[in-house]
Image (cartoon, rainbow, N blue to C red):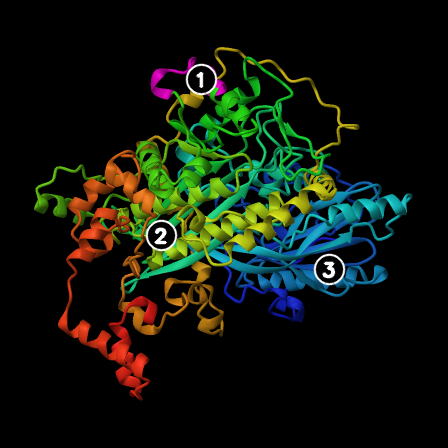
Amino acid sequence: MSTQTNTPTTTHLQIPASASTDSSGTVTPASQQSTPLPSAAASTHDTISTGSKDTQSISTTIAAQSTSAKATQPRAEESLAFNKFILYENRLRFYIVASNTSDSRHRIIKIDRTSNDDLVVVEDEAIYSGKQMSAMLKMLEDGNKGCGGLGKARVFFGVAGFIKFTAGWYMILISKRSVVALIGGHYVYHCESTDMIPVAFNHRIDKPTEEQRLMNIFKQVDMSKNFYFSYTYDLTSTLQHNLTRSGLSPARRWNMNDRFAWNHHLLTAAFGTTTAPSTRSHWLVPLIHGHVDQAKLTVLGRVVFITLIARRSRHHAGARYLKRGVNDEGNVANEVETEQIVSETLTTPFYYPANKDTPDGKQGRRPSPNYTSYVQYRGSIPVFWTQEVTSMSPKPPIEIPVMDPFYTAAARHFDDLFRRYGSPIMILNLIKKREPQPRESKLLEEYTQCVRYLNQFLPPEKRMIYRAWDMARAYKEKTQDVISYLEDIAEESIQMTGFFHTGPEPFSHFLQNEFDGEEYPWRSTMSVQNGICRTNCVDCLDRTNAAQFVFGKRALGHQLYALGVVDTPNLAFDSDAVNMLTEMYHDHGDSLALQYTGSALVNRVETYRRMPHWNSHSRDIIENLRRFYANSLLADADKQTAINLFLGVPSEKTGNRAPPQRGNYQKWFKDEHLETAYPLEECEKAVNQFVNTRGDYWIEYYRPLLFTSLGKHFAFSMNSTLKLPGKTARDINMSPFLPHHTHTHHPKLMDGVRRWMGTNPSAGLRTSRIDRVQDQKSKKPHSAAESVPESLPDMVMRLLDPIVEEEDEYQQYVIWVSYSSGLDLTYFQVRRARAGAPRHLK
């Protein structure tokens, strides 16, 4: 049957009422390119043919189609994005109609249902209007009456992949979604619910018991928790990579980073290929697993979005005690890439309108200077080590079963980090140094020797910076301020690697430096991040998350300073901005801990700041018991089996693994990986090219014909500093960088005596060198750091020579009299008196 272009009786594509399953509660972006609309008859491929038995992959099908209809096929970079799908079915085949947000462009896919073993997918390359698609559906309805017509329409929001257990294929549909973030006009969705439906109409199963067992194992990976996707934004890559892709070297230029696409096996296995082109199709949706969070920072009328994205790697993934260290390919356990995006929403897209000085007089575009990004990394120690879980010990002993004197697997791991992030690489190792029974210290010695061995073959300027610090001991002995020490390391790392900023530094910084007589360099170009900080402890959870929060806090200060929001990168604790970031990193750490261990974080940021909540001790006990139960009583084994089945990892019994190839013991790296990963000039050209060719996706963010309310709009209802507990509308005029109150910390007697006598000169808070310089430069109240704990001699001198105000003394006298004699004071008198009373009387 061939398609026709006769004017149909209906003028719009009929959408069933089940479309309400979209819980996003907001408009959805899709591209709206000015691509010429082809006629439905222009396609030379017979989409409706019932005799097609094309078993090639969908990527091959698309490639073959593009040769026959080049005039109707837009370029890959400018292809339309579809975010709504309708499924029609009968006994012979599925029909999937893909639509954009405004229902003005459609495409159709056919899936054969007659074969139980082969998956046959045929995709029509033509792009149809609403009228043309209505005519197409009417013809399909008439032509398939003998096998049930088109059946009842079913709305879904993307295909997550295909899976086959013992017989027959299943199609996994995203049936419900919700918006969790907005990046440059691109919506990021959380997968709320999925459906698994058999492809074949007569789904014959020879081993029903085994089929059901494998399906139950597969469903243990809950796809309704912590899986995220976007139709128009590549969530598998960083913001810097997405905007500068065209300016990178071929080794670093990927369209999709399949390392972080957890459904990569589901997208590719059905088509007999392990390559990624099939995932570029508009109806197959890559999913990342991890955490996505976004909140608003309201700064005196200016709105800043803070976005936190954590991407878990699908390589060497699994449960806590069953996946440790590194494998032969150089992939480490619990590998997570965390990206912190800070942007000011003066305009929605990634660009500004440029001046009309072009020869043709058209309005051009220039990159918006309001987007910044900072990336950090966590992963298990890249040596071979295990922990036996046969015993009931809450902390099983650590064993190093394989001693590789050339550290081949670690070499592959660090070479891959150089390829992905460039140099320099800072390694922050937070495991314990001294223990009564050697446990973590074994790994410390092995890891230190590994880095020392690999560094000797690197060029001096490319060597990895190794920082080993016993964070747990520093906290327990109270000889150092853990947070301040980490802030020093964070500042050092950020100064070395930099961060991504799409524009120059605000010109006000140049004027301020000139006014102050300072000779600080002013950055007139965009900024890129070359290099990464790799943080680890044993589990890469509690200590690592606290350290990454400190890095994120320090980076937030620099990002806000680069955007011109603050006049110093130093942000005070106990301010609205830092409190909001703290909660975001708590949720970030809890999500990763639940995925890896089955329990939330045990030690939080407040623990290392020595500000524990009153119930923190009991909470720590509960979380430790929950973690012990989840990891010990066979729960990890079932969880690992489910993850392996989901990711397509063959079992050790059936997998035919090739022996690992030996690398070069001295030249363990590739020279091109040591080159600058993101060259500044090429990246600037790439960003300009991006905003002029890929910037139209945001247009459908605005839908003036859609009747909705602000309460359903994600950007309006997003969490913000104005929604913190105790906030009112009047707080919009308050700076979120001012600390709420100053904590007065009275040290123990012996601690004060030691500091007074000078026996421990290193005690007390450690102030960052950068902090001291910038605190002297800054004259604003919000740049003040936390108060230093009061020493014993200062406390004695303050009590011997108190400063007493007559009014305060009178108010204290009134409250004392009211409490001792039981006088009947009015409400306002008591309230006024208590305002000046000592703390223990309030």
Q: Which residue is mark 2?
A: 343
* Prevalent SS, magenta region: helix
**Of 776 and 715, which appears nearest the observer?**
776
Residue 225 at x, y percent in the picture: 62, 53
Mark 2 vs 1, N-terminal side: 2
Label 2: few (<14), some or many (≥20) within 10 Å?
Answer: many
Q: Which residue is mark 3?
A: 88
Residue 498 at x, y percent in the picture: 33, 36
| Residue type at the position of mark 2 | Ser
Give the Cα distance between marks 2 and 1.
39 Å
**Of 500 and 394, which appears nearest the observer?**
394
* Residue at x-position 57% and y-position 21%: 409
| For residue 350, side relative to residue 136 (left or right) | left
**Of 440 and 834, which appears nearest the observer?**
834
Local SS, label 1: helix
| Residue type at the position of mark 3 | Tyr
Marker disc for residue 712:
none
* Residue at x-position 34% and y-position 44%: 555
In the image, residue 799 lies in the stretch drawn in magenta: no
Residue 232 visible within the image: no
Marks 2 & 1, CB-CB < 8 Å contact = no
| For residue 174, side relative to residue 554 (left or right) | right
**Of 562 and 385, which appears nearest the observer?**
385
| For residue 475, side relative to residue 498 (left or right) | right
Query: From the viewer's perspective, is residue 401 above or below residue 366?
Result: above
Q: Which residue is mark 1?
A: 452
Label 3: few (<14), some or many (≥20) within 10 Å?
Answer: some
Give the Cα distance between marks 3 and 1.
61 Å
Magenta stretch in the rendered image:
449-462
* Residue at x-position 44% and y-position 44%: 546
Mark 3 vs 2, N-terminal side: 3
Local SS, label 3: strand
